[in-house]
Image: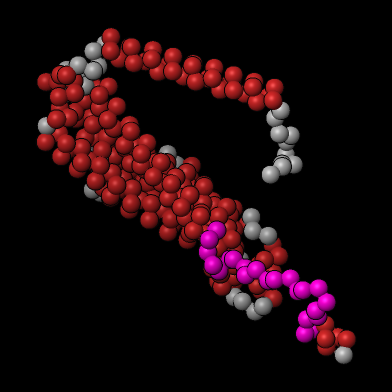
Amino acid sequence: MSTVLYDLPGPRSRRRHRYYGLAGTVVLLALAGWILSLLFRTGQFTAGKWTPFTYVGIQELLLTGLANTLRAFGLAAVLALGLGAVLAAGRLSAHRPLRWVCTLLVEFFRAMPVLVMIFFIYVALRAEPLTALVSGLALYNGSVLAEVFRSGVNSVERGQGEAAYALGMRKTQVMVHVLVPQAVRAMLPAIISQLVVALKDTSLGFLISYEEFLHAGKLIASNLDYDLPFIPVVLVVSPVYIGLCMLLSWLATWVARRQRRNPKVETDEVAAPEPGTLRAEDHRAHG
């Protein structure tokens, strides 16, 4: 398939690209080897530093922390999506006072550092650690998602809404059945990116003594009995966070594919009439 954006590379360009790729691979392998050599020289792979992970108590501590992280993320994600939808609807409202109030809330919570909100809810309101963490994440990410939803709806072609209004649909029906379904595909990458931010920000819970995954890793890394296994903890905890973020990205891809295969947006193929035949409308026109 040809492209109109750029010319396909010729033999010399493809050869040059292969050289660039090979050189980049060599550089990355050399960097990885240098880092591994540093870790080996500083004794980060000694049995004493990795011994804690063989104990059932340590494994249960990590699993409990991971479960708490997923619980906080799940609650914060649901609340942030709901709050974002409400604030976006308010910002798109035709009523000026409601639009101003929602705009003020969005700008305030989006500008406020999430850590400040978490500490304020935890200290000033004397909330439980989970409540403070979830509330801070929901307020911040909900305000950001409100702008994502609003821009996504506004990105839909204006004629789509006008055509729906011409058919007699109310504003809520136009929003739910016409604008939002078309905007979801454009909004999905930004939504997933913001949910990834919320997932990583759950690690702020250890600052208010919430026993999440990073808090469990900190307890292990600060253990003097195992010679402060900081690097092993990082090598165990980091892939888990990376895997969760990749799982969210995979979920977004799966949802996008399901949308493209949605039978509501697919059209049936109509066979072309055979030569020498006329449709019923043509017969009536000729008659």
On the image, which quarter does residue 53 sit in? top left
Q: Where is residue 213 in the image (x, y as percent from the top left)?
A: 26, 38
- Main SS category, magenta section: loop
Q: Quadrant of the N terminus?
A: top right
Q: Quadrant of the C terminus?
A: bottom right
Q: Would residue 286 be found to the left or right of residue 99 on screen?
A: right
User: Vertical placement of 285 versus 158: above or below?
Assistant: below
On the image, which quarter does residue 60 sit in? top left
Residue 46 at least partly seen: yes
- Please check the rendered image and state whether residue 149 is part of the magenta-colored stretch, yes or no: no
Residue shown at 74% from the left, 34% from the top: 7
Looking at the rendering, the stretch of residues picked out in magenta corresponds to 260-281
Q: Position of residue 57 (x, y in %)?
A: 11, 36
- Please check the rendered image and state whether residue 276 is part of the magenta-colored stretch, yes or no: yes
Residue shown at 76% from the left, 74% from the top: 273
Residue shown at 29% from the left, 27% from the top: 235
Q: Would residue 72 be found to the left or right of residue 46 on screen?
A: right
Q: Would residue 151 be found to the left or right of residue 239 on screen?
A: right
Q: Nearer the viewer, residue 125 or 20?
A: 20
Q: Where is residue 268 in the image (x, y as percent from the top left)?
A: 62, 70
